[in-house]
Image: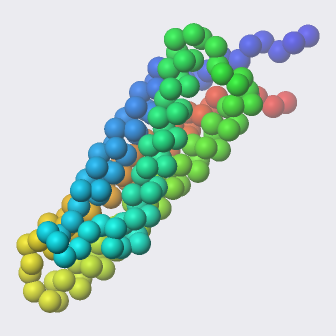
């Protein structure tokens, strides 16, 4: 006798909402960091940690957008593309992206704290403070995006096929 069809533990609309919020937060973070510079002296791309954070955000945006599109198809048609096999890819992809977003935010926080300590010893420069504050704001928004990505990961865990 075939097992009964599995029903999602969390409504797909909730999963879609979490993915959309994640995408918006990561997009805001990427925009803030990409436009962050000190007049002509320095740019975010002069620091490896900031470049890593931006790359993590771009990868996170691409993955979240793809998963949101697949979730929209699932919500509108009722058929899950790829079936149970894609649920496993979904689960591991969500884990990977959430870790990537967390490490990107952490790298940015760490470098910003170190740079603030150095610049505070050399005197106050409003352009430098503005640059570092924007980097911190970008990292904070990315960290909130990580939290929503982790929630998405939990939702995809609940959608895994039951193994007996």
Q: Is residue 52 left or right of residue 90?
A: left
In the image, residue 7 above or below residue 116 = above
Residue 6, position as x, y percentages in the image: 71, 17
Percent coordinates x, y for residue 11 in the rendering: 52, 19
Q: Position of residue 68 (x, y in %)?
A: 49, 29
Answer with left or right where residue 29 lies relative to residue 11. left
Q: Which residue is located at x 38 percent, y 53 percent? A: 143
* Nearer the observer, 124 or 39: 39
Q: Residue at x 37, y 46 (%)?
A: 26
Above-or-below relation of 44 to 17: below
Q: On screen, 86 above or below 2? A: below
Q: How was the colour assigned to the protein in this rendering?
A: rainbow
Residue sitting at the far bottom = 122
Residue 11 in view, yes or no:
no
Where the N terminus falls, by quadrant?
A: top right
- Quarter in which the C terminus is drawn: top right
Tell how many labels.
0
- Residue 70 showing in the rendered view: yes
Looking at this view, name the residue that lies furthest to the front: 40
- The residue closer to the viewer here, 20 or 160, is 20
Which residue is depicted at the point 29% across and 45% down?
28
Please name the residue shown 17% across and 89% down the image.
121
Image quadrant in which you'd find residue 126: bottom left
Q: Residue furthest right?
A: 1
């Amino acid at each position: 006798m075939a097992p009964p069809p599995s029903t999602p533990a969390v409504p797909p609309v909730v999963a879609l909402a979490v993915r959309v919020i994640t995408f918006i937060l990561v997009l805001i973070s990427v925009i803030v960091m990409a436009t962050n510079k000190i007049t002509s002296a320095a740019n975010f791309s002069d620091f490896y940690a900031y470049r890593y954070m931006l790359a993590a955000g771009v990868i996170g945006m691409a993955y979240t957008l793809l998963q949101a599109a697949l979730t929209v198809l699932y919500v509108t048609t009722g058929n899950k593309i790829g079936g149970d096999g894609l649920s496993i890819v979904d689960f591991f992809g969500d884990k990977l992206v959430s870790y990537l977003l967390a490490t990107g935010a952490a790298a940015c926080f760490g470098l910003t704290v170190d740079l603030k300590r150095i610049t505070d010893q050399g005197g106050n420069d409003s352009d430098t403070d503005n640059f570092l504050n924007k980097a911190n704001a970008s990292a904070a928004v990315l960290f909130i995006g990580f939290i929503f990505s982790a929630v998405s990961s939990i939702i995809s865990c609940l959608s895994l096929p039951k193994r007996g």
